[in-house]
Image: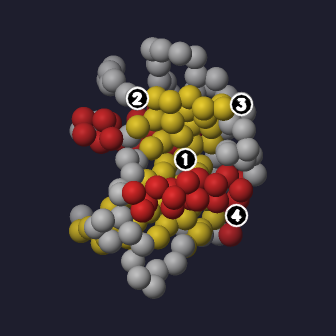
Amino acid sequence: MTRLQLRIQHLERGAAFPHDDDDLGEALWARLRTELPRGVPRPALLTLFSESVQVIDLLPILRSGQDVHRACAAFASQEGAQALAAVGVMNRRRAGTVLGHFGVAFVEWPDGRWWCCTRPLDPLGRPLEGSEDDVQRAVDGAAKPGGLGAWFRRARYEQLNVRIDGPPVN
């Protein structure tokens, strides 16, 4: 059993985290865009429940050397989880080579639907000149971005669980 000490914030779901797929994705992307001018934000995982949102700081997981994808899948195993979202600045890689830094908001639902917006950034976290937001969705037949998602499926397949010592999740 892996044990990590993580910072988890609990928020009310409210209007800031809509239930509609596109509205939720756009809201998360808008939040990220407002943080970028202040510097590169820490990557976060959000577990969305009907009435609350759990915000998990991903940096300790990344620094620990643990499998971050497996950790995300474990959070998807929580009873009542309606969606998982990864938000932050990430490196895009191909064959081990870093292609660049991207602002990313990715949302996945238990049935496999997903929504993703990316935008290339310079090393300081500013949008590259001439770049635009790139929104992709599973419902449009787009290929899922590599390295993101399949968390609910993995949680079911590997029978993952997460135990949180602290305040109630939802």
2 vs 1, front mark: 2
Disc 4, SS: helix
Which labelled disc corresponds to residue 85? 1
The alpha-carbon separation of the residues under discs 4 and 2 comes to: 33 Å
Visual colour scheme: secondary structure
Amino acid carrying label 4: it is Val
Tell me if 40 is positioned left or right of 131 in this view: left
Per the model, the C-alpha gap separating discs 1 and 3 is 16 Å
Crowding at dot 3, Cα within 10 Å, few <14 / some 14-19 / many 20+, comes out as few
Residue on which disc 2 sits: 7
Q: Residue at x 52, y 78 (%)?
A: 132
Q: Which mark sits nearer the N-terminus, 4 or 2?
A: 2
Q: Which residue is mark 3?
A: 51
Q: CA distance from mark 2 to mark 1?
A: 16 Å
Say which element carries label 2: loop
9 or 21, which is in the foreground?
A: 9
